[in-house]
Image (cartoon, helix red, strand yellow):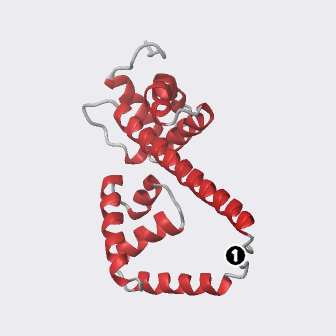
Amino acid sequence: MPATADDSPTLEQEREVIARLQRGDRPAAAELYLWYGDKLYRAVILPRLPNPELAEDVLKDTFRLAMERIHQFRLEDRSIWFWLRRIASNRAIDIHRARQRAHKFHEKHDHQEVADRTMGRPPPRPDRAPEIAETKSMVELSLSRMNSRYAMALQLRLIEDRDREECAALMDVKVGTFDVLLHRACKAFKKVYPP
């Protein structure tokens, strides 16, 4: 008897659906969503990201990422729920942090714009292309002097602005390992980047 949204599936039911997904049977994703979609949304995503529209986007991203990486999932004596929960939680935290950064950026620049107008100062000069080009070349030079894995971690996460899961997948490591690499890469970058 198939599980419904009200009761959790057995490990055997999960294994059957996961095996179908790993063989490329995408309709099996509907069963996984029926089992865990609402639970992820209410118990994992909304508490971390209390904006329903963004939370729905994170839920979609969670299942998209899970389907893209289902071949990496290893059957163990525990539910796929824990894997899905980790993906959803990390994605929600990434979105929340990005919104906080954007909010702080806009808040800072809105205050600066008002201050500039009230102080009578002209706005900053628009032609910053030479400075940007120089900074970009210094960053590229610094990256070339670093360990290639550290340089790649910085490139993917900070320059290309990819999310942690995608960076980890591209580097063929776990997300936790990627986080450690990125931390070490930041420390190494400080040593080689000119002040």
Task: Tell me which residue sits at (35%, 81%) in the image.
Answer: 146
x and y percentages locating residue 20 in the rendered image: 45, 35
The one of 85 and 79 positioned closer to us in this rendering = 85
Type of the residue with mark 1? Pro
In the displayed image of the protein, which residue is found farthest to the front?
A: 119
Mark 1 is surrounded, within 10 Å at the Cα level, by few (under 14), some (14 to 19) or many (20 or more) other residues, namely few
Question: Residue at coordinates 46% horizontally, 23% vertically from top-left?
Answer: 35
Q: Evaluate whether residue 147 shows in this view.
A: no
Helix, strand or loop status at disc 1: loop
Residue 78 shown left or right of residue 106 in the figure:
left
Q: Which residue is mark 1?
A: 124
Taking depth in this image into account, of 70 and 114 the one nearest to the observer is: 114
Which corner quadrant holds the N terminus?
Answer: top left
In the rendered view, would you say 62 is above or below 30? below
Position in image of residue 75 (x %, y %):
30, 37
Q: Is residue 66 above or below residue 123?
A: above
In this rendering, the answer to whether 153 lies above or below 145 is above
State the quadrant of the C terminus: bottom left
Residue 15, percent across and down?
A: 36, 30
Q: Give the tally of numbered discs.
A: 1
Q: Position of residue 167 (x, y in %)?
A: 44, 60
Q: Residue at x 45, y 16 (%)?
A: 2
The quadrant in which residue 119 appears is: bottom right
Quarter where residue 126 is shown: bottom right
Image quadrant in which you'd find residue 54: top right
